[in-house]
Amino acid sequence: MAKRIVILCMGLLLALFLSFTERNRDRVSFSRTERRMLHIPTPGLFDGGGYFTVTPDDLKRDGWCFPVRDGVLFTPEFRHQPVGWYIMSAEEGHEVRSAMEGVVRLVRKTDLGRTVVVLHPNGLETVYAHHDRTLVKSGDYVAAGQPIALAEADHGVVYTYFTLMADGVALSPDVIADSSGRLKPVSLKFWRDADGAVRATYFSAGTVEERNPDFEWEHGPELVDLDRPFTAMERQHVGVATPGLFENAQTFTLDLSRAGKWCYPLPGAKVISPYGGKRKNHTGTDLKTRPNDKIRAVFDGVVRFSGKYSAYGNMVVVRHANGLETCYSHNARNLVKSGERVKAGEPIATVGRTGRATTEHCHFEVRVNGVPFNSDYVFDHSRHALRDVRLTFRRKSNGSISVKTD
């Protein structure tokens, strides 16, 4: 009798795995890149006609579950990510549960803290971050509601960060569930446009062409692998190409309205010398406040260069996943070193006049593939505001970069 029960259970488990998903039938093991990188495309996701859909039936089949039992959504002052949900737990060590059944793709420490990513049969991924301890490993099958991590306290609050991803692009859980955690009766269609951006829209039952004007979401891909170690050349020089940036096309588009968290490089500063300057050869924008004021990273990224560099004096270069690099020079002191991850708004240097400078200021540059361009495309310096535009960068045959704004 016991033997029959064991055989029956093994048969049921095998059936679950075989029926787990047609779209991800072989996705129980992952490459090294998939196990290490948070934002990556999902292989085969758009093979069936250039788009994929997620319906309420798909979500119910995969067993929707709110990630934290009795958890409450809140917006903390220390909010790091603009997309997902912050869910407050009752106590430290509270269980964080998988929202749907799936296969664990990634378990590692990221910029979000200890992070778990689960790939689901419907094609979406769910991200769970900021944990005291993780309870699963890459390749594990998890059921909806299964504990996968334990929540951690920070700033006096116990919480977990939760978001969705479609083909590696973050998507707010609001599109499929309300703030109480109940599924919305909606269907979603996802596709990639000609620029490689992932787009999504609601569609009505019975057709994938009828769009609901109340919702449209778009996000460009993360173009640069920030987990790749820097070469000696990248750590020692400023104007170097960014590997993979123009690998598949001669252009890429950056939508600054979807840039996520950002920070003006020197709050309170005024421009004392614009890009180009009087002699048309000034490759950056000079920003002035007071000596030793803190210079801040514009976007999240990784410090590629930190040191003395010719007439620039003390200089910091930060590489961002969106394809840009930002440079900060003439610093009195660099506060970061090569290889460090930094968040938008984090102090990375102090204002000084090292190198060739006549006054204390920050020489600020924005570069693409090692080539500087006018930072006015990115910032309205008079308002210290990020511009709400789409920028298209084209690499010319001579290696120069042209910038076009929509």
Image: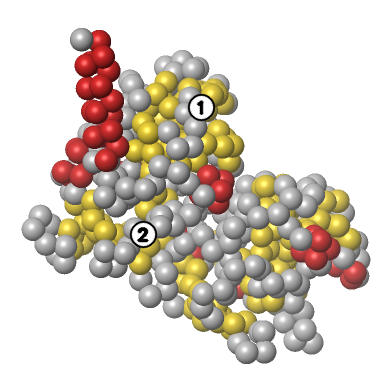
Q: Residue 115 appears at what percent x and percent y?
A: 51, 36
Q: Which of the labelled discs sits on residue 44, or is there none?
A: 2
Looking at numbered disc 1 in the image, what kind of residue is underneath it?
A: Thr
Determine crowd level at label 2: few under 14, some 14-19, many 20+ residues with C-alpha closer than 10 A: few
Which quadrant would the N terminus be assigned to in this image? top left
Q: Which residue occupies 22% across, 22% down? A: 8
Residue 279 visible from this viewpoint = yes
Q: Which residue occupies 25% across, 38% down? A: 62
Q: Residue 87 appears at what percent x and percent y?
A: 41, 30
Is 213 above or below relative to 31?
below
Q: Which residue occupies 46% across, 67% down? A: 255
Q: Which residue occupies 51% across, 75% down? A: 248
User: Which residue, given by chain and number where applicable, does mark 1 sit on?
Assistant: 134
Q: Residue 188 appears at what percent x and percent y?
A: 23, 54
Question: Which of 80/144 is in front?
Answer: 144
Q: Residue 399 appears at what percent x and percent y?
A: 67, 84
Quadrant of the rendered structure where residue 147 is?
top left
Looking at numbered disc 2 in the image, what kind of residue is underneath it?
A: Gly
Q: Classify residue 33 as left or right of residue 327.
A: left
